Image (tube, rainbow, N blue to C red):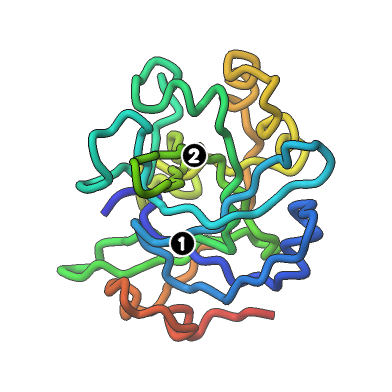
Amino acid sequence: MSMCGRFTLHAANEELQEQFYLETQPQLSPRFNIAPTQLVAVVGKKTHGGKNGLQMFRWGFLPSWANDATGHRPVNAMLEGIAQKPMFREAIQKRRCLIPASGFYEWKQVGKQKIPVFIRRTDRVPLAFAGIWERWQSETESIFTCAILTTAADQQLQNLHHRMPVMLPPEQWDIWLDRTTTFTQLEPELKKLPTVDLELLDANPILNNARNETPECLAGIPHD
């Protein structure tokens, strides 16, 4: 399974509007097992400036020059060297976004079993993954897709996976979304992001099946 390959978004719509400075309140249903190829909430800067907008994009990056919309599409993009990779180099300069998440999943090996672990901020404030997006256009349809940037895992997560999503602090959101800021300007700051205080909690193995999309995925994990 890829990293980051599953996540959740079950924060209240009012909280998302306030935290992500959204122009209008989103109408999202709680999600407990978001998987690749599904629609995910993406936050970007409105073209007229001011507040941000939220749209639903397909998770799995489809470059504009692809011959068709079929086949495996990457859900993650490695931060290291991204500006030199043909698939991502234009998007990282011109089409950056935030992907809100209440938390994400990783798996630990226990004997012969893989046990899912739910990872969230200790203060339970939604995370903001650094993302990129793209528009693919054919004669009959237009598809918007996205990918989550990843970086080397910190000490909190190293025992689960060698990679983790890039989690941006609020003070960097505006500059990340600013189309006039080049990735060359951003890159030094991304390499010294502050550590996010995370808690790791065992989740319900039912979420191993992406079709299981209920609060039971987090059975036993406090929500208050």
Placement of 204 over or under 196, stated as above or below: below
Q: Which mark is residue 32?
A: none
Q: Residues within 10 Å of mark 1 (few under 14, many from 20)?
A: many
Q: Amino acid at mark 2?
A: Trp
Q: Residue at x 71, y 40 (%)?
A: 45
Q: Residue at x 23, y 46 (%)?
A: 72
Q: Nearer the viewer, mark 1 or mark 2?
A: 2
Residue 145 image point, x, y percent: 43, 46
- In the foreground, 191 or 88: 88
Task: Name the residue that disc number 1 marks.
Answer: 7
Secondary structure at numbered mark 1: strand
Residue 163 image point, x, y percent: 39, 41
Placement of 172 over or under 155, stated as above or below: above
- In the foreground, 163 or 138: 138
Q: Residue at x 37, y 32 (%)?
A: 64
Task: Name the residue that disc number 2 marks.
Answer: 133
Secondary structure at numbered mark 2: strand
Q: Residue furthest left?
A: 112
Q: Is residue 176 left or right of residue 151?
A: right
Residue 11 image point, x, y percent: 66, 70
Quarter in which the N terminus is drawn: bottom left
Q: Residue at x 15, y 69 (%)?
A: 112
Q: Amino acid at mark 1?
A: Phe
Q: Residues within 10 Å of mark 2 (few under 14, many from 20)?
A: many
